[in-house]
């Protein structure tokens, strides 16, 4: 079964706080938030924000301080503007991307232009878009994600229902496992699993990022409005 595009509203003002662990080591935190008061190019938008920070006590080993900002349309969570600030163990970078969905182009830092596909989303708006879709086990959604100047066609099967324990409590969830071919964002030994609460909020209560060196597990510990 393929999901129909039936959108549920997100909640402006929402902030989700996660603890991040690598094996049994607490390595930092992630904060996801929604601001619903943005107007970009005369279009009402959500400002989606992701902040990822490492544990200061591990600064001798590594540091991580990444922020991603996305202006997405309110009606279908399509990104219009993307901005990222990356600070990782002495390496820093900055990038901004303007999406022109009418012309199917992505402009990087106003200089480099990459062709995109209809309905393209970035990695952050993709997470939020899945929250707006009514889902059930055995459903599959096919999407296009644009990341690092590349387009990736991905399939997101809803694998199973599962009870997940978090610092915030126990949640009944639906496990979504995005998949792609090749060496893209979920290929080449990497991968991602997302457990969405099986209710009207569709909170991503647990996120597992799989890498060649192991897995980082994000568990929801706080919800604020």
Image (tube, grey):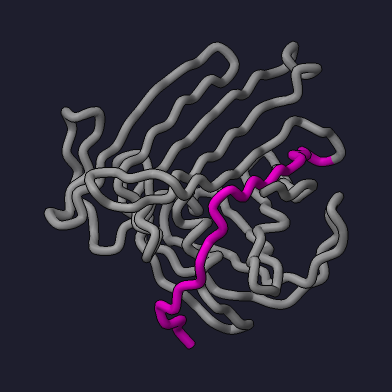
Q: Residue at x 65, y 28 (%)?
A: 53
* Horizontal side, residue 84 vs residue 172: left or right: left
Above or below residue 89? Residue 67 is: below
The spot of residue 143 in percent (x, y) is 39, 66
Query: Does any portion of residue 210 appear in the rendered image?
Result: yes
Assess whether residue 21 is covered by the magenta stretch.
yes
Considering depth in this image, is 212 or 86 the residue closer to the camera? 86
Which residue is at a point 24% across and 33% down the rendered structure image? 108
Residue 81 occupies quadrant: top left
Query: Residue shown at 55%/65% (left/top)?
Result: 131
> Which residues are drawn in magenta?
1-23
Which residue is more in the foreground, 174 or 89? 174
168 relative to 96 in the view: left or right: right
Q: Residue furthest bottom?
A: 1
- In percent of width and height, residue 37 lies at 43, 46
Tell me which secondary structure the magenta stretch mostly adopts: loop
Q: Residue at x 86, y 59 (%)?
A: 165
Quarter of the view holding residue 66: top right
* Residue 184 visible in the picture: no
The x, y position of residue 3, in whole percent, is: 46, 81
Name the image quarter holding residue 216: top right
């Amino acid at each position: 079964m393929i999901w129909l595009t039936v959108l549920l509203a997100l909640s402006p003002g929402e902030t989700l706080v996660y603890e991040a662990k690598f094996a049994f080591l607490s390595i930092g935190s992630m904060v996801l938030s929604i601001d619903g008061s943005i107007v970009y190019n005369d279009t009402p938008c959500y400002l989606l924000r992701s902040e990822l920070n490492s544990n200061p006590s591990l600064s001798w080993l590594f540091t991580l301080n990444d922020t991603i900002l996305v202006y997405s349309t309110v009606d279908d969570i399509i990104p219009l503007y993307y901005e990222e600030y990356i600070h990782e163990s002495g390496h820093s970078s900055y990038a901004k991307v303007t999406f022109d969905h009418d012309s199917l182009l992505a402009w990087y830092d106003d200089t480099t232009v990459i062709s995109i596909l209809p309905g393209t989303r970035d990695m952050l708006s993709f997470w939020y878009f899945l929250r707006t879709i009514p889902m059930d086990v055995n459903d599959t959604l096919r999407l296009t994600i644009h990341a690092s100047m590349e387009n990736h066609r991905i399939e997101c099967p809803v694998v199973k229902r599962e009870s997940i324990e978090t610092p915030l409590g126990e949640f009944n969830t639906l496990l979504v496992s995005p998949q792609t071919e090749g060496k893209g964002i979920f290929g080449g030994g990497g991968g991602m699993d997302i457990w969405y609460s099986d209710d009207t909020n569709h909170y991503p209560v647990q996120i597992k990022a799989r890498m060649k060196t192991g897995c980082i597990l994000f568990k929801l510990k706080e919800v604020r409005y």
